[in-house]
Image (cartoon, rainbow, N blue to C red):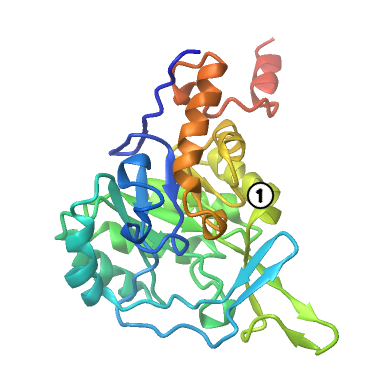
Amino acid sequence: MSVCDLSVRIGALALRNPVLSASGTYGHGLEMESFTAPAELGAWVSKTVTLAPRGGNASPRICETEAGLLNSIGLENRGIEHYVAHTLPVMAAADTLVITNIGGERVEDFVELARRLEREPAVDALEVNLSCPNVQGGKLPFGSEPEPAAAVIRAVRAVTRKPILAKLSPNTARLAEIARAVEGAGADAITAVNTLLGLALDWRTRRPGLATVQGGYSGPGIKPVALRCAWECARSVSIPVIGCGGIQGASDALEYLVAGCRAVQVGTASFADPALPGRVVREMAELLGAHGLASVNELCGTIHDGRELASSARGH
């Protein structure tokens, strides 16, 4: 069996492998080092950091479903000052890249967060959360239309030199347009996608599973939708796409790469098995080596989706 090189590039970021944690599912990273060592992953993505501390939404805010779970955490976190003072000094020693996910309800919130983190050397990149369905009543002010999304990325780009990942929502009919808009506004990569809006009910009690009624649906049940979203983004932009949604093993991750992604994020499955992200990396190397691939990059974007056939036909 040959040895496969798993290293990839996401813009200016050089990752040792294409597997990252997903924001909100792995703490800030170091909480999980006894399960997955920092050096095992391409990067750790923090849970969302906001300007002020947030207590999050009312309970219940987690609800298990038939093929995944619903959450309505509401971006609970201790705010940017606590993150900078207490989390980043520890993360600075981690043997992996650190990507800080930032969230806000106004463009100015994102700008101030980016400006504050620009001077933090422990932060290798910013993931701009344009797509959380669990704040502002699920209205997705920055995630459902191209121009609001672009406005955030454009404003963040103006105050930071760090790579910017734009995390997009599947809850829109204009995903490809939004992907192109954030690319044009200065994003270095796209994370596709955040959770689907969902609802759980108990017919006996007539009560919803979440206090907020609707919430973000994640887990294996969303993979076909998330995979389609990632493919749609990858075929619409020239910047790298990071796929996210329903990954439970190396084969799931490799499907995203074939669809056109350069990397993936492992999220909900980590709740049941915190060691899973590291195991996905090892299994990925084994599978690719067994198929004779020298580099994981040979797999990226190799989907037979008809585009090359159509261009070939036009050439004749």
Q: Does residue 306 appear left or right of residue 180 in this picture?
A: right
Q: Residues within 10 Å of mark 1 (few under 14, many from 20)?
A: some
Depicted 43 relative to depicted 251: above or below: below
**Looking at the rendering, which quadrant does residue 100 occupy?**
bottom left
The picture places residue 181, in percent across and down from the top left corner, at 47, 53
Residue 134: quadrant of the picture:
bottom right
Q: Is residue 63 above or below residue 248?
A: below
Front one among 107 and 58: 58
Answer whether residue 162 is visible to the viewer in this image: yes
Q: Residue furthest top?
A: 316
Q: Label 1, secondary structure: give it.
A: helix
Quadrant including the C terminus: top right
Residue sitting at x 46%, y 33% = 282
The residue tagged 1 is 223
Task: Between residue 57 and residue 234, name the one nearer to us.
Answer: 57
**Height in image: 19 above or below 270?**
above
Please name the residue shown 25% across and 70% down the image. Answer: 83
Say which residue appears at 28% left-offset and 45% top-offset. Answer: 96
Q: Which residue is depicted at the point 23% across and 57% down? A: 91
Across and down, in percent, residue 188 comes to 36, 46
Residue 56 in the image: above or below residue 122:
below
**Quarter of the figure with residue 312:** top right
Residue at the farthest right position: 204
In the image, is 254 to the left or to the right of 41? right
Q: Amino acid at mark 1?
A: Lys
